[in-house]
Image: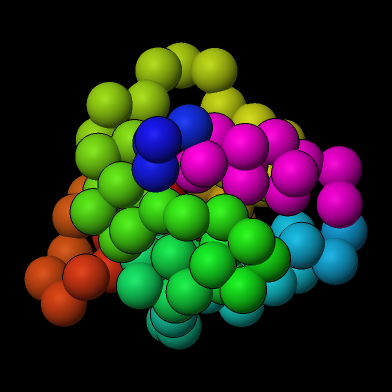
């Protein structure tokens, strides 16, 4: 259920400038690492039930079909390596 909730959240974010900006706020400077705990908290605040572990799992198994937001984050210089401390770079 939580992975489905994460997918629903991703669909909600795509094309929603306010949510996209909020997701970008979950990127920690300077390397563009994604704070997965912050992203999960944002999702919960918007009514979605997924965890940082769900985000980590989804990102490690994502296919070549990136959303517009994911493409934008990647084009900003983020990578897909995992960092310690619950953050992952896109």
Of 86 and 2, nearer the camera is: 2
In this rendering, is residue 83 above or below 29?
A: above
User: In the image, what residue occupies the spot 73% across and 49% down?
Assistant: 13
Residue 54 visible in the picture: yes
- Residue found at the very far left of the displayed protein: 84
Secondary structure that dominates the magenta span: helix
**Which residue appears at 16% of the width and 77% of the height?**
85
- Locate residue 55 relative to residue 73 in the image: left or right: left
Looking at the image, which is closer to me, 10 or 30?
A: 10
Q: Does 10 appear in magenta? A: yes
Q: How is the image coloured?
A: rainbow
- Is residue 59 inside the magenta stretch? no
35 is higher (above) or lower (below) than 68: below
Q: Nearer the viewer, residue 25 or 9?
A: 9
Front residue of this view, candidates 47 and 10: 47
Residue 76 picture quarter? bottom right
- Quadrant location, the N terminus: top left
| Residue 75 appearing in the image | no
**Residue 59 picture location, percent across and down:** 34, 39
What residue range appears in magenta?
A: 5-16
Q: Is residue 17 above or below residue 79?
A: below
Please provide percent x and percent y for residue 68: 72, 36
| Above or below, comparing residue 34 to residue 14 in the picture | below
- Percent position of residue 40, x then y: 44, 65
Residue 6 falls left or right of residue 34: right
Q: Position of residue 87 (x, y in %)?
A: 28, 68
Question: Left or right of 55: which side holds 77?
Answer: right
Farthest top residue in view: 64
Q: What residue appears at the point 62 percent right and 46 percent down from the top-left corner?
A: 9
Q: How many marks?
A: 0
Question: What residue is drawn where x is 41% and y is 53%?
Answer: 50
């Amino acid at each position: 259920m939580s992975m489905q909730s994460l997918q629903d959240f991703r669909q909600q974010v795509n094309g929603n400038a306010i949510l996209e900006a909020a997701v970008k706020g979950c990127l920690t400077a300077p390397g563009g690492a994604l704070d997965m705990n912050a992203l999960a908290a944002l999702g919960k605040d918007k009514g979605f039930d997924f965890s940082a572990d769900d985000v980590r799992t989804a990102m490690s198994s994502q296919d070549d079909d990136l959303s517009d937001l994911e493409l934008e984050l990647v084009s900003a210089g983020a990578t897909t390596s995992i960092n310690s401390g619950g953050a992952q770079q896109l």
